[in-house]
Amino acid sequence: MIFSFPRTARATSTLAVAAAVLLLSACGGSDNQNAGFLPLPPSGSNPGQTTPPPAESAPPVQVAFMPDIHFHDVYANFKDGSFPGVFNPKSGRNATIRLMHAQMTSTRLFNENYFAFITALDDAVARGVKLIALPGDFSDDGQPVHMRGLKKVLDDYANKHGIQFFAAPGNHDPNKPLERAGGKADYLGIDAATNRVGAPQPIYSRGGNGDCAASNYSGEWAKVNSSYCTEEVKEQGYAGITEALDQHGLMPKAGYRYFETPYSSYSYQNYDFAKAKEQAAWSRRTFEICAQGAGGTYKKDGYTFCHDVPDTSYLVEPVEGLWLVGIDANVYVPTGTGPNDFNGSGDAGYNKMLTHKPHVIAWLKDVVARGKKQGKQVVAFSHFPMSEFFNGASDDIIALLGAGKMQMARRPAEDVTKALADTGLQVHVGGHMHFNDTAVRNYDDGHGLVNIQAPSMAAYVPAYKLLTFKDATHIDVQTVRLDNVARFDELFDLYREEHRFFTDFPGRLPGGSNGVLWDKTVLDAKSYGEFSTRYMSELVRLRLLNDDWRCEMRELVKSPIYGSDLLVLSQLQTKVTLKQLGNTGNRGLLSSAFFSCLGDAGGDGSAQQAAYAKDYADAEAKARALAGANGMRLEDFNQWKAIDLAGDFVRLANAGDLAFADIPADRARQYKLIAQALEGTNTALALNGSQQVMNDNPAHAVFQARFKPLMQILLKLAKGAPTQHFTIDLQTNKLTDMTSAPTPF
């Protein structure tokens, strides 16, 4: 595939006003569920006016948004005959899956999301949805063996149900712009020595690991030592992704009412399918990017490492009146002169779009202006968020946990969000974060942007977003949970074998979780929703606490501390230092690992058991009185442990109000009381130069200083804009919550 960068800017054309008719969708047929859309102005009328809808209008258009599928074909056929998979007695087929351990230590599931995707598609079909957008990470690194499986699923639903898919790539589709070696070390395999199911199976393409080095592997496939070497798992880059999905939004189709790219030169008025197809050729859809910023007409003196790379952005009008803008927001910043010398795009997002792909932002502004002039409803989707996604708590999270924690590197800057709103775009649906969130930005001149973060069905809470375009000024947004997924436990017997294998051979457990095996009670889940909840608890325990939380906070919540102890700690005042507490009999229930997090300031380390016991008893009396004054008993707080608080904190961060279903109302009330109790504290911590907590701090200081802001953040996360079901008023840029269930917070 040859890519060349067009040096001239795209011409903006005067567009004709569309006729005032409600046409059937591209799928044809009077019974089409998406037939009809927005009332458009009649020929010759003022483009800013619309005609009233007919008395009996067709059903409103619905678009489902399903990002971050991370499709992995669990029964894939390695067509070169290399990896046979592992026989699954429950299905009678050979499973080509990743280890359960890999899932429990990853921010995405690799296997069960296969069944969740099928369930989501069936749910959309049952609702009469004909348009489905895939905002990135539809694959998990774009391997041929799994892309074939994804294409087959999309083709089947398109052919059988008239579904039109619209894909926009994410950072896990082309990991880098061009093809490169790939593979994983943790497929589920069979141990050669014992013939037992459960051993990690490395599978790599040429150059992916030492076994599969080019010197060892030159044919179609090979088995070298313990590794399968096959080109079925290479990372294809843009060329392979676009070839597989060119008929699912990336290229024009005869049934579309309109299609263009940032590199097209025709107008809406003179649109012609043959011309659109010619100008959509991949050789015309590239741009120049340099290490310091955008190339082409934007290039400045001194820019280095400039490359021409593909861009898959497009505008499509699949049904009359709806303009879907699929933005390729991947930004691969060059790092050298080699063909694949680029940084990954995972942390770049729109912060880099403005500096390195400004021509796409300029095109978006032009699209929005033209769409509004013609009475089109313009909605954009891409893989990356256009705004902050933690309900205004991002700065608090950085202050508490440090820069870069909880994916803060992926937060768009506020001036970037404003620049995106300045394009005139009002609604954007993003993915990437695996979060469920709604963010609204309103600006002084009356314009604003609603960023809808659609959750991933491969994470917690599994769901997708359904947008219904009710009329020209209102969009209904629903979050469709995927709690009940057929066949979700089809692979569980294989996981049980894996757990037994690692129990017997703990030294074979892959690295990344400090040698801790996942809890097999995860497999007791009775539904996919419950499975995702248990998965999140394991992810917190095995990875996220280690990745994101400060050492003393992490080890405090991992200690055998109940909620009642936390309420008592909120009331504790003592002169006993952490060093002295460490030498008492019970250490205040804190673990040895907690004390290992502390820096030694020297000084008095004598045990102060009696003094601490008295101070703790006083605090317990205050906590009991505080609970009683709020209609509770201190013993009520013994229904949960500190580790449950950590899990619920992460659940609220990831799922927003969808997490309410998994947090008991009584526990939520108890969280609020602990937060209220901590509000009255004003404790500072003594830190060393490395920001390590010193052990000469009073014993109450760590909890009060660290968990006061944590509880404030938790409540912010629980009180964001609605996400489950709401309407957007495009005239006022305001949301109306359509749910009636009371919030536990």
Image: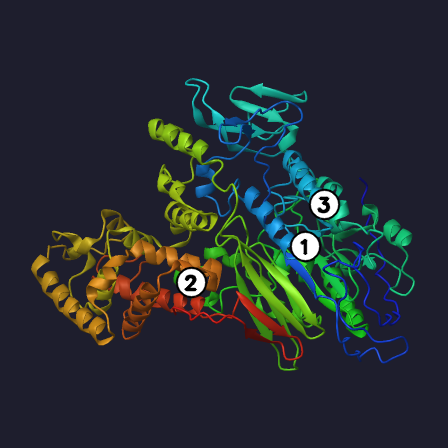
- Quarter of the image where the N terminus is located: top right
Give the residue type that dot 3 points to.
Lys
Lateral position of residue 83 relative to residue 22, left or right: left
**Label 2 vs label 1: CA separation?**
27 Å
Q: CA distance from mark 3 to mark 1?
A: 15 Å
Horizontal side of 716 relative to 65 (left or right) equals: left
In the picture of the structure, the residue carrying the numbered disc 2 is 660
Q: Secondary structure at mark 3?
A: helix
User: Which image quarter is the C terminus in?
Assistant: bottom left
**Crowdedness of circle 3 by 10 Å Cα count: few (<14), some, many (20+)?**
few
Residue 677 visible? yes
| Mark sitting earlier along the chain (3/1) | 1
Mark linked to residue 132:
1
Please indicate, yes or no, whether residue 308 appears anywhere in the rendered image.
Answer: no
Disc 1, SS? strand
Foreground label between 3 and 2: 3
Q: Amino acid at mark 1?
A: Ile
Mark closest to the chain's N terminus, 3 or 2? 3
- Residue 160: which disc? 3
The percent coordinates of residue 412 (x first, y second) are 58, 63
The three-letter amino acid code for the residue at tag 2 is Phe
Q: Position of residue 285 (x, y in %)?
A: 80, 51
